[in-house]
Amino acid sequence: MRASVAVFMAAPADEIWNIVADVRNTGKFSPEVIEAEWLDDATGPALGARFRGHVRRNEIGPVYWTTCRVTACEPGREFGFAVLLGDKPVNNWHYAFTPVEGGTEVTESFRMADSVFTKAFSVLGGQLRTRRNIRDMRKTLERIKAVVEAPSGQPS
């Protein structure tokens, strides 16, 4: 299972990347993630850094924590992380920042790891989850867009 959403933002890629890559901001933008925090000695985005996210699935529950590892970290270009089950990646989230005239096209995507579970889930409800993820990715990106495009000093 996989999908992506792209949204144009009238802001520089570096500015948007700084917001996205600081996972402590995730709760401000994501419909499902309540908060996130860096783990171990991590104080910011770096390849291999770990963090945990506090999730409220479907915005109603269940509520749980996930551990994640940064898998892509190139300022102004891309940021990605894997959601882990133990040490095994089960879902991969990725943001790509493409400079275009007047701003940046930001693409958020997810790709679930290929497994027996994923194949079964795909048949038993994966389409609903994919639709939900697409809707939530769009909401997340639109919320980020509102912040980066807000006039300076104005609340968003």
Image (spheres, helix red, strand yellow):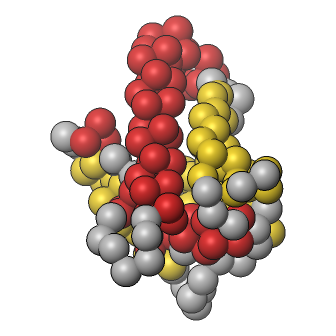
Q: Is residue 120 left or right of residue 89?
A: left
Q: Residue 118 at x, y = what percent?
A: 59, 25
Residue 59 visible here: yes
Residue 81 visible here: no
Q: Quadrant of residue 68?
A: bottom right
Q: Residue at x 50, y 48 (%)?
A: 141
Q: Residue at x 57, y 25 (%)?
A: 117
Residue farthest to the left, as pictured:
60
Q: How many callouts does the rendering have?
A: 0
Q: Residue at x 63, y 63 (%)?
A: 11
Residue closest to the eye, 79 or 150:
150
From what the image shows, is residue 98 above or below residue 116? below
Q: Residue 6 at x, y = what percent?
A: 63, 38
Q: Quadrant of residue 46?
A: bottom right
Q: Residue 52 at x, y = what percent?
A: 46, 67
Q: Is residue 29 left or right of residue 4?
A: left
Q: Residue at x 41, y 42 (%)?
A: 139
User: From the image, which quarter does the N terminus lie in?
Assistant: top right
Q: Residue 156 at x, y = what percent?
A: 33, 64
From what the image shows, is residue 44 above or below residue 13? below
From what the image shows, is residue 44 above or below residue 116? below
Q: Is residue 156 left or right of residue 112?
A: left
Residue farthest to the top, as pictured:
123
Q: Is residue 123 left or right of residue 45?
A: left
Residue closest to the eye, 32 or 83:
32
From what the image shows, is residue 136 above or below residue 46? above
